[in-house]
Amino acid sequence: MEEKKLDVKSIIGFVLIFAILLFMMWQNQPTPEQLKAQEAEKQAQIEANKKAEAATQTDTKVTTAVDYSIPKDSAQVAALQSKIGDFAYSAATSSFKDNQLNVSNDVLDLKFNTKGGHLSEVRLKNFVDFDSIPIYLVKDGNSVFNIQFQTTDNRTLNTKDLYFQPTVTKSGDNTIVSMKLKTAENKFLEYNYVIKPNQYMVDFTIRSQGLETAINTSNPINLDWTQKTYRHDQSISFENRYTRLTYQAEGDVDKLSQMSEDDEVEQDVDWLSYRQHFFSSILVTDKPFKEVAITSKNLVEDEARDSIFTKQFSTKTALALSGSNLNNNLKLYYGPTDSEILKQYDNNLEESVQFGWGIFGWINKYLFFPLFGFLSSFLPYGIAIIVMTILIKLAMSFVQYKQYLSQMKLKVLKPELDAIREKHKDNKMKAQQETMALQNKAGASPMAGCLPALIQMPVFYALFMFFPIAFALRQKKFLWAEDLSSYDVVAELPFSIPLYGDHVSLFPILAAIAIFFYMKLTTGQNQMSAPQQEGMPDMAKMMKYMIYFAPIMMLIFFNQYASGLSLYYFISNLISIGILLVIKNFILDEEKIHANIQVQKAKPKKESKFQQKMKTMMEQAEKQKQMQQKNKKK
């Protein structure tokens, strides 16, 4: 009776603690006025960055075709012809050598370089990094887009070294940038870009006209696209974990290695994504590339030293010819790794988001992302995480009930199980047979407690993947956490601890405390109810160590992980403690369970084929053991 009172007091205590924590979290939420002020401050910072950038750059926007004239210096023309053959025409006539053209829409600021004819700078207008610096996907030579070909006079040329003639025109609301590498006025290789309003996707065409006499089309015309990915997140190691080259080949989405160097040769590739955790550069083709060589290289060996780039990706493929000319229709996406945005552009691009493999990805894609999107549409993001956690725990409470019921049955049977082991202490096999028979009759198999835990695993892993990839959480504040997609900081350390880092995060500490008390409650019950099986590891001893090991791992591993995930585990374990206490004190009755077990034992129970097979195997093993003992005596 006294134990019952103490349990009720424990319940009241946990409920009060949980209520106080929720009240504190709600009270510390920013008011609508504060949220509005924070948003205004953020926009002001973005505008200030734009003005500062504009002040340091020269506006070279071109809106009409340019009239080029052939230089009068014949010696210069001869030198160019000697170096690059027929393509000297383009270099000799270009008055825009190594110059930049600025074009923008509502979401992108783009710069095209006349040398190479491709994008030399891509800035995402509506985003800044963890340090309020504008997000650049392409800048300062980190990306090279090159076509290599052989000329009819046996030269190997690269477009990245050649000068294109630019034209920028308007077609309705669209801006069209044409870059032409010419051998004559009507003979050229053209890059044609169509920039649409408020779109992250740029239509991109590579075509040639009249170059049959200049380019040797019997040799492959190879496209090379290499890009070093800039660091944008607070933790470069955390960002690097979710920075991967992803592609769709033969209808299936796959990816290169997460952290080590990797390369593959793939057939029939529809698109390639250079994913940088929350931002991506994607190349899409309307007709699959027949064969593509792709490579990923990790650039972060030392986080303190390698702090600019995360990975280097490269792609090499042969461009298809239409007759004797090129005519490849492509698309270039520079924008957020956000499944809702990527869905707008078809081509299955949303699959470049790392939802998780198999059933875990399905749970995220069709359950957790829609659920969180709905909750965050009318709740602050931190509160939306708490409400989602409560809903998930309530939905899974029946699993916890089944698990605890199995433990209670084993606890009730413990005296009888101890008696069996004592009776057959000299015959371990017989003891194990009778133990299994008793558990089977009573419906108290240890496996019954394992199955509910296995049911929870897909949900557990799916949520582990959800929080780090949820773009909606990026730079969203909650309580002391500045960014729910990154770690929270309550103290900076004057040194860096291996694996832990140079800061202290509070949410992992709270989650570790909660998981310690939860495991203390469940492990205590397990130790009383689940005696060690013969020939099996001492699970009670292992669980005793896990009580301390699991919280320590939580502290270390999650210190640099998304604070939204640590918040989820903190709330989840608090709710689990509450559910466990309610089940123990108000739902399950040990005396009723004992009475029910006696009824089950009295009923004749037919063994399943599996149980019969196990029994036969154990009997055969026992006979073999006895035969071996007899042979030893002889």
Image (cartoon, rainbow, N blue to C red):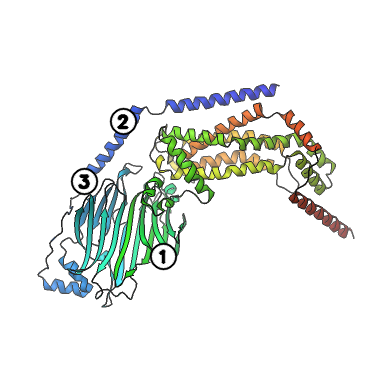
Q: Nearer the viewer, mark 3 or mark 1?
A: 1
Amino acid type, residue under disc 2 in the picture: Ala
Quick one: label 3, few (<14), some, or many (20+) residues within 10 Å? few
**Could you say which is closer to the camera, residue 568 or residue 262?**
568
**Could you say which is closer to the camera, residue 134 or residue 335?**
335
The CA span between labels 1 and 2 is 49 Å
For label 2, the residue is 37
| Mark positioned earlier in the residue sequence (1 or 2) | 2
Asked whether residue 315 appears in the rendered view, the answer is: yes
Q: Residue furthest right?
A: 634
For label 1, the residue is 293
| Mark positioned earlier in the residue sequence (3 or 1) | 3
Amino acid type, residue under disc 1 in the picture: Ala
Amino acid type, residue under disc 3 in the picture: Ala
Q: Position of residue 306 (x, y in %)?
A: 39, 52
* Residue at position x 45%, y 38% in the image: 372
Q: Nearer the viewer, mark 2 or mark 3?
A: 2
Q: Please, is residue 379 above or below residue 311 in the view?
A: above
Asked whether residue 504 appears in the rendered view, the answer is: no
Q: Secondary structure at mark 3?
A: helix
Q: Quadrant of residue 50?
A: top left
Q: Please, is residue 464 above or below residue 90 in the view?
A: above
- Tell me the tag on residue 474: none
| Mark positioned earlier in the residue sequence (2 or 3) | 2
For label 3, the residue is 54
Q: How many marks?
A: 3
Q: Quadrant of residue 574?
A: top right
Q: Secondary structure at mark 2?
A: helix
The quarter of the picture where the C terminus appears is bottom right
* Residues tagged 3 and 1 counted as in contact (Cβ below 8 A): no
* Residues tagged 1 and 2 counted as in contact (Cβ below 8 A): no
The CA span between labels 2 and 3 is 25 Å
